[in-house]
Image (cartoon, rainbow, N blue to C red):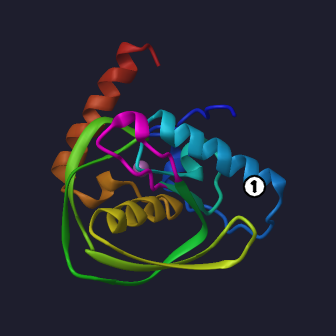
Amino acid sequence: MPILDIVTFPDKSLSEPSEKITTFDDALKTLIADMAETMFEAPGAGLAAVQAGVSKRLIVVNTTIDHENEAEEERSYMALINPEIVEADGEFISEDEGCLSVPEFRATVKRFNRVKVTAQDADGNPLELNEEGFPAVVLQHEIDHLNGILFIHRISSLKREMYKRKVKKWMKGQGR
Ligand code: NI
């Protein structure tokens, strides 16, 4: 399965909302498998389709169980299609949050502590998830991507501007 290229900030596609998925075919299943492979390879806690250049409402989340012995690691993931947060409460300070599309930057983000999410699976069947703490943060982060929101839009503008300047410098350095 191919590893997909990850789109990074400031690519415009990352700030645009993704389209609803209405066709549940083999191409969708292939995309899900490739996205999961890409997420494991990165490695990341989750990945939204828009980060792989596909502007559709699909996310994968890493549910790998880490055993004490690394060799026993069991890779697993979940794909959520057209996910929506239908309930959210509490507060969770997500320290050191990062994103594969925002390289070399981490920040503290204020998130909800608990979310209820409805979605569809790869065959279009309805799904419902209730998560708390870190898994709830991953869902909020990935669903944000589908709405064109990056975690740097949820931090102070001062910190965001610092990061933007850093990116501009890199791009100049690379002659872009
Ligand atoms: Ni992200």
For mark 1, give the secondary structure.
Answer: helix
Using the image, determine if residue 138 lies above or below residue 123: above
Q: Is residue 143 left or right of residue 107?
A: right
Total labels: the figure holds 1
User: Residue at point 49% right, 39% down?
Assistant: 40
Of residues 73 and 91, which is closer to you in this image?
73
Where, by quadrant of the figure, is residue 42 drawn? Answer: top left
Q: Which residue is mark 1?
A: 28
Which stretch appears magenta? 62-76
For the N terminus, which image quadrant? top right
Q: Is mark 1 within 8 Å of ligand 1?
A: no
Of residues 107 and 136, which is closer to you in this image?
136
Q: Main secondary structure of the magenta part?
A: loop
| Residue 102 location (% of width, % of height) | 37, 40
User: Residue at point 58% right, 39% down?
Assistant: 37
Q: Is residue 77 left or right of residue 113?
A: right
| Residue 29 location (% of width, % of height) | 74, 54
Of residues 18 and 5, which is closer to you in this image?
5
| Residue 161 location (% of width, % of height) | 23, 43
User: Residue at point 48% right, 54% down?
Assistant: 15
Where, by quadrant of the figure, is residue 83 drawn? Answer: bottom right
In magenta stretch: residue 139:
no
Q: Is residue 152 left or right of residue 65?
A: left
